[in-house]
Amino acid sequence: STSNLDHKIFDENQDFFCDRRGFNRITRDVTNKYCEVYDFIPTAKFYAFDNFTYTTDQVDLMIKLAKANWLESEKQVKGIIIDTWKKKRYARLNGINFT
């Protein structure tokens, strides 16, 4: 399939980039049932910022990516919001200017 071939090329490019920069690359386990966005290729042309026309498959893929990103960071985002709310509340109740 084309997406598997594209993903293989993406993996090869990432390996080359990480080797050149001295990064340790952690690859995804595509056999893991939680790896839902296997078809996502971040270097695909339709992800460019100047592209305003998408197919329904591309939109569905972007929605899957957004959901996966939210599930991965939901707890952290909610924690930051709650901490900020607590700081603002404390400042308001104690007459402190919150910055």
Image (spheres, rainbow, N blue to C red):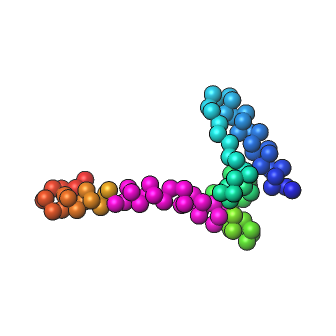
Q: Position of residue 13 (x, y in %)?
A: 74, 39
Query: In the image shown, does 74 or 65 lie closer to the viewer?
Result: 74
Tell me what residue is drawn at x 77 percent, y 39 percent. 12
Q: Quadrant of residue 53?
A: bottom right
Tell me what residue is drawn at x 25 percent, y 53 percent. 99
Q: Quadrant of residue 35?
A: bottom right
Q: Position of residue 97 (x, y in %)?
A: 18, 56
Question: Does the stretch in magenta take in 74?
Answer: yes
Q: Is residue 67 above or below residue 73?
A: below
Tag count in the figure?
Answer: 0
Tell me what residue is drawn at x 62 percent, y 33 percent. 24
Q: Position of residue 96 (x, y in %)?
A: 15, 56
Query: In the image shown, does 40 or 73 lie closer to the viewer?
Result: 73
Quarter the N terminus occupies: bottom right
Q: Which residues are magenta?
A: 62-82
Q: Is residue 85 above or below residue 30?
A: below
Tell me what residue is drawn at x 69 percent, y 68 percent. 60
Work out whether residue 98 can be spotted.
yes
Work out whether residue 40 can be spotted.
no
Q: Residue furthest right?
A: 1
Question: Does the stretch in magenta take in 19?
Answer: no
Q: Most prominent secondary structure in the magenta stretch?
A: helix
Q: Residue furthest left?
A: 95
Q: Position of residue 40 (x, y in %)?
A: 71, 56
